[in-house]
Image (cartoon, grey):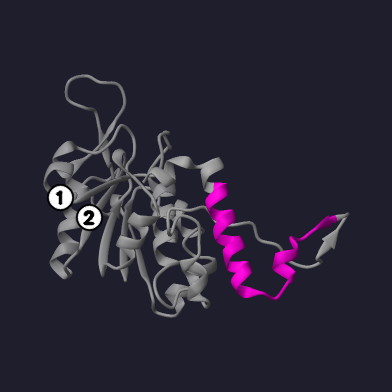
Amino acid sequence: MRIDILTVLPELLTSPLGESIVKRAQNAGHAEIHIHNLRDYTDDRRRTTDDYPFGGEAGMVMKIEPVYRVIEKLKSERHYDEIIYTSPDGITYNQHEANRLSTLENIIILCGHYKGIDYRIREHLITREISIGDYVLTGGELAAAVIVDSVVRIIPGAIGDEESALTDCFQDNLLAPPVYTRPAEFNGWRVPDVLLSGNFAEIEKWKESQAYERTKALRPDLLEE
């Protein structure tokens, strides 16, 4: 899978996308991530990527030319399944969307900034708008990092134990059951006996019950979905 990220602050993406599972997935050839600095696609010496909005609103707007140029360049080199814009207006991101994106071959993620981008980009080039929550960030880089991390980790081969990804929270609209490790008793707190029983059928029943009860208590909205 190839992911191209368009940003005015590439340094913000270097660390989160260069460590852990995402790094190993790239090294193994399961994922290819390219970060493009929009300032490289400007035509003035100051490498300007923003301008004042028409109509007199406060704040600045990302200019149309740099974004258009880099997207058109990338599209001339390969087909893209999705061109995503990180925006508070977009669909709320969830595990189902991460699963869907992980099946695609090539995607572009445009990181929003300032008061947003010239709306003509959204009208004519963007195919998907995604929000990671109802709050405002300084820019879309952190949102892009969240999307990339959640997508890359479920690409086949990215995680050594692929079954682990399939049992993550939200995969089946349930929260994960509690997990424990050694020692079996600490400070008088014991691991549930069923997990020490060796009865795997009963253990699975316990996990399913716990997942359901925790979801009902903490995230009942997931059960409604």
Along the viewing direction, whichever of 150 and 203 lies nearer the viewer: 203
Q: In which quarter of the view is residue 181 placed?
A: bottom right
Q: Is residue 140 left or right of residue 23?
A: left
Q: In which quarter of the view is residue 62 placed?
A: top left
- Span shown in magenta: 189-214
Residue drawn at point x = 33 percent, y = 55 percent: 97
Q: What residue did someone put label 1 on?
A: 125
181 vs 123: above or below: below
State yes or no: discs 2 and 1 in contact (Cβ < 8 Å). yes
Along the viewing direction, whichever of 31 and 208 lies nearer the viewer: 208
Q: What residue did someone put label 2 on?
A: 83
Predominant SS along the magenta part: helix
Residue drawn at point x = 30 percent, y = 69 percent: 2
Please check the rendered image and state whether residue 191 is part of the magenta-colored stretch, yes or no.
yes
Percent coordinates x, y for residue 148 in the rendering: 40, 59
121 vs 163: above or below: above
